[in-house]
Amino acid sequence: MVSIERRPTTDTPPSHRPRRRFAAAVAAAALLPAGLAATAAADPQTVPNGPWTGENGSSLAGIHSYEQLWSTLGQIEQRAQGSFDLSAAPLQSNTGRDIPVVTIGDGPTSVMYIANQHGNEFVVSEGMLDLVQSISGNSQAAQEIRDQLTVTIVPRVNVDGFDADVTDTDGDTTPWRQNYDPRCTQAPCDPFYAIGRGYDINRYHSYSDNAYDHPYLEGDDNLNPVPEAIAMRLLWDERQPELVIDFHHQGTYVDEDGKMITGSTMWPNADEEAAKLGISDEFADTVERSQRAVSVMLTELEQYGYANITRYPSTSTPGIARNAYGLLGSASVLFELRGGIDAKSNGYIAKTAANAGQAVLEAVADGSWETASLEPVKNIRERGDYVSDPHE
């Protein structure tokens, strides 16, 4: 059974042109009755009460392997409309694997989406595949995105942590949270390192002038030990995106009414580090632009009955992608979707990521995100209590 790591807690809406959706009605119809029926024997904890891991088959069922991911992206490239490029990230993983990077469109504004930095948070990679297929198609919305934007999508950053044929020093196999870098076998090790396994990629994004800089050592150096994080920063250097969105999973949480939370979002909050760098004013502007992107997402997802989005109780660690790219000047958003569920429910998670991602691209393409109301952000609820799997 795959176990998703759970992290402890701590104007008017923008108007958009009519959009072609990702079969939202199908996903909505599939979720609620299936979840309720599958867990009828369990004591209700949430509404709906499930689905949970293992109820309807392996949570990895239907998830593209490394080889399948590359193959599917190649197939999409063959039938893509407009500008489409499938290439490898600037650096390989520690097992020598290429990280797939998709570039769609050739417009003047750059946007960058990354997903699956944590190897056991893999359903969002399927959402990025859905999005790649949609915006490379022949719809009017897709054509306008390609004309106005250059979209960089990295559907799976942590290719090793998802399905590399490796074990850590405890004999555990993937998928796991970290990358693969088992050099440190006893403490002390670097910050955010799992002994005998590897690094949390999403803590090692450099926010200095040097992409190879270790974010937790004083001064400029070339000591960043995480090739996947360096690769994302090198892409950022090359693309200079106006906006970065980072897609993850979280555990299962409930709101104050007992309704299951299906996603949580957050913007940059490294205010202390910004002050140290003397960029507080610039960072405040970046935070506001990030919140406008969040507002677009919240407004889009409000129409779907299966989406219940809250504020993510995030830390201010500067090496997190959301904070690092915010400190570098890009609007930056974290989007965490419910994880640790089975294959039958993965579809609505993937669709939530795809729908939110496309809504933001359309808003950036037509410029409406710049004037999006901040009211949805002001009214966003805090994430509620964690709920454990009743079958564990």
Image: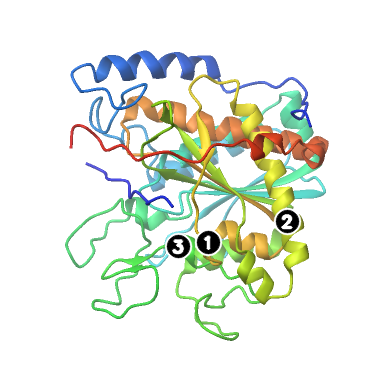
- On the image, numbered disc 2 is attached to which residue? 286
Quadrant the C terminus occupies: top left
Res 80 seen here? no
Element at label 1: loop
Element at label 2: helix
In terms of image quadrants, where is residue 198?
bottom left
- Please state which of residues 346 and 79 is positioned toward the viewer in this rendering: 346
Give me the residue at 69% from left, 75% from top: 277
Foreground tag (3 vs 1): 1
- Please state which of residues 269 and 162 is positioned toward the viewer in this rendering: 269
What distance separates the C-alpha of mark 3 from that of mark 1?
Answer: 9 Å
* Amino acid residing under circle 3: Ile
Disc 3 and disc 1 in contact, CB within 8 angstroms: no
- On the image, numbered disc 1 is attached to which residue? 320
What distance separates the C-alpha of mark 1 from that of mark 2?
Answer: 16 Å
6 to the left or right of 43:
right
Foreground tag (3 vs 2): 2
Where residue 176 sits in the image (x, y, percent)?
Answer: 31, 54
Where residue 34 sits in the image (x, y, percent)?
Answer: 33, 16
23 relative to 134, above or below? above
The first of marks 3 and 1 along the sequence is 3
Give me the residue at 24% from left, 28% from top: 57
Question: Looking at this rendering, what residue extends furthest in the front direction?
Answer: 256
Where residue 330 sits in the image (x, y, percent)?
Answer: 71, 57
Q: Residues within 10 Å of mark 1 (few under 14, many from 20)?
A: many
118 relative to 346, above or below? below
Disc 1 and disc 2 in contact, CB within 8 angstroms: no
- Please state which of residues 342 and 219 is positioned toward the viewer in this rendering: 219
301 to the left or right of 170:
right
- On the image, numbered disc 3 is attached to which residue? 201
